[in-house]
């Protein structure tokens, strides 16, 4: 793109690319130190012009360009703006700064205002990229990689690539945009040319997960259509799997908000208090199980556990169940509503899925020990219902006391972490479960931990085909557990 006045310019500066800030900086320094005024320069990008570049003057010996230090940071950000006149604009600012060093602090100056607006636009675009890039999986096994298509307003791919490397270090991925692409092969980041939308895959298995997630976090009572469109402008919708839900969710928001009000907490059902009273008649702190020599002594001691505040609202402790010499211990997250009332792990909807798949895999539940990372039900009251609430790291840590003793008494060959909370409890650190599922990790004490998803994950998938596929994957994992049990 050639600005007006091109023919009159004494210097044609050719930049390697739209994002060649080092090239601009070097040329600007030489030209400013040689007193070349803005109107004598024409800036262009190699790919857009066949105009031969001028030889630029050398830096005059002993001369230094003095500009406020913060200018370079501002200029580097504004340089990513798509405005084709930005190279000349930034040089004009540099030119003025030589004699007006406080220029950037004068908010009313049109150039300062323009610089701020350009930076703001670039930052906003970066924020959108970080929030709205959606990877689609292609290939399986060693060929597995993730590709995303994104259409930024400005030249921000290079600027944001490191963010995606940090966020998705363990994946191999490519982000394609019309201007540039970023490719991470697990070890090295490469910035390449732009691409077409048709180069990116359109759909994959993760789409329905995104949709399920979005449906779940959508709060109809907070719906402000204008604010939502400002935050998630329509131009991004077509690349977001969850966006197809938005029109229906907006249309149904009034009804959903009314239903939500009906779900506001009411007092707990009277029979919950009865169950609680039965299992916890005195509410006195109990002996904490230090002296327990068997699983049943440990279970008895756990009835009085107050290691974290979750005991207050749950009706009872739900301890592990199964033979105390089981070769395999399955660890879930925490008891759910039905488990809390029954006092037994995995008897509710997730338990039913779990049982059926164990059965298909030929694993006899009677022969394995099933327990949870957290032994009390954590929930939020909503109307008459108690809605599962994920235990936090402190609660998991507090409850490790019990799981460590269960494992020490049972001494299994294998522990199976069902989901992220169980993995955190068994391994002492958070791990990416979907990425590491199917792997066996050996702990320092020699216990092998097999990592897989939580069965409730299958329950949350709406699409029948996706649900079946996830069930198959879990069955495959359970068959692997069976092989490890008998190996
Ligand atoms: N989910 C769990 O993690 N554990 C249970 O006991 C039930 C549901």
Image (cartoon, rainbow, N blue to C red):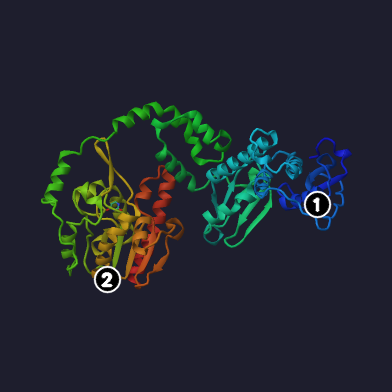
Of circles 2 and 1, the one toward us is 1
Q: Do the residues labelled 2 and 1 touch (CB within 8 Å)?
A: no
Give x and y (percent) for residue 277: 12, 47
Q: Which quarter of the picture shows residue 375?
A: bottom left
The tag on residue 190 is none
Q: Nearer the viewer, residue 43 or 470?
A: 43
User: Going by the image, does 177 lie left or right of 268?
Assistant: right
Task: Label 1: state its secondary structure.
Answer: helix
The tag on residue 30 is 1
The tag on residue 411 is 2
Mark 1 burial class by Cα count in 10 Å: few <14, some 14-19, many 20+: some
Q: Quadrant of the N terminus?
A: top right
Give x and y (percent) for residue 81: 67, 41
Residue 328 vs 214, above or below: the answer is below
Count of numbered circles in the view: 2
Q: Nearer the viewer, residue 197 or 270?
A: 270
Question: Is the CB–ligand 1 distance for label 1 below 8 Å?
Answer: no
Q: Which of 20 and 440 is in front in this view?
A: 20
């Amino acid at each position: 793109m050639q600005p007006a006045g091109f023919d009159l310019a004494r210097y044609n500066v050719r930049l390697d690319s739209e994002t060649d800030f080092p090239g601009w900086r070097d040329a600007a320094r030489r030209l400013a130190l040689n007193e070349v005024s803005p109107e004598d320069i024409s800036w262009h990008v190699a790919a857009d012009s066949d105009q031969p570049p001028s030889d630029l003057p050398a830096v005059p010996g002993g001369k230094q360009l003095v500009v406020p230090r913060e200018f370079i940071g501002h200029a580097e950000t504004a340089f990513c703006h798509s405005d084709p006149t930005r190279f000349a604009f930034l040089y004009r600012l540099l030119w003025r700064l030589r004699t007006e060093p406080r220029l950037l602090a004068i908010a009313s100056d049109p150039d300062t205002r323009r610089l701020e607006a350009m930076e703001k636009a670039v930052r906003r675009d970066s924020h959108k990229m970080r929030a709205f890039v959606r990877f689609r999986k292609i290939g399986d096994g060693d060929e597995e990689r993730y590709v995303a298509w994104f259409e930024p307003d400005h030249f921000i791919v290079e600027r944001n690539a490191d963010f995606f490397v940090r966020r998705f270090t363990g994946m191999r991925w490519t982000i394609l945009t019309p201007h540039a692409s970023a490719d991470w092969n697990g070890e090295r980041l490469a910035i390449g040319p732009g691409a077409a939308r048709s180069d990116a895959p359109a759909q994959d298995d993760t789409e329905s997960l995104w949709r399920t997630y979005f449906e779940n976090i959508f709060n109809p009572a907070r719906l402000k259509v204008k604010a939502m469109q400002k935050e998630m402008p329509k131009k991004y919708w077509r690349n977001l799997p969850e966006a197809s839900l938005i029109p229906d969710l907006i249309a149904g928001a009034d009804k959903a908000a009314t239903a939500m009000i009906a779900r506001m907490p009411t007092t707990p059902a009277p029979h919950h208090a009865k169950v609680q009273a039965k299992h916890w008649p005195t509410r006195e702190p109990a002996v904490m199980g230090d002296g327990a020599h068997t699983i049943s002594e440990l279970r008895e001691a756990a009835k009085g556990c107050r290691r974290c505040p979750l005991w207050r609202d749950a009706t009872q402790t739900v301890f592990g169940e199964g033979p105390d010499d089981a070769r395999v211990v399955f660890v879930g997250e925490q008891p759910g509503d039905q488990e809390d009332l029954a006092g037994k792990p995995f008897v509710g909807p997730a338990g039913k899925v779990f049982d059926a798949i164990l059965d298909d895999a030929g694993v006899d539940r009677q022969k394995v020990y099933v327990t949870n990372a957290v032994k009390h039900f954590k929930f939020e009251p909503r109307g008459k219902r108690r809605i599962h609430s994920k235990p936090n790291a402190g609660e998991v840590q507090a409850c490790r006391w019990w799981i460590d003793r269960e494992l020490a008494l049972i001494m299994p060959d294998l522990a199976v972490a069902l989901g992220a909370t169980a993995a955190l409890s068994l391994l002492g650190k958070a791990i990416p479960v979907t990425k590491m599922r199917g792997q066996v990790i050996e702990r320092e004490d020699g216990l092998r931990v097999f990592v897989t998803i939580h069965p409730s994950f299958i329950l949350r998938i709406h699409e029948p085909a996706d649900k079946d596929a996830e069930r198959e994957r879990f069955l495959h994992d359970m068959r692997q557990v069976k092989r490890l049990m008998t190996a």
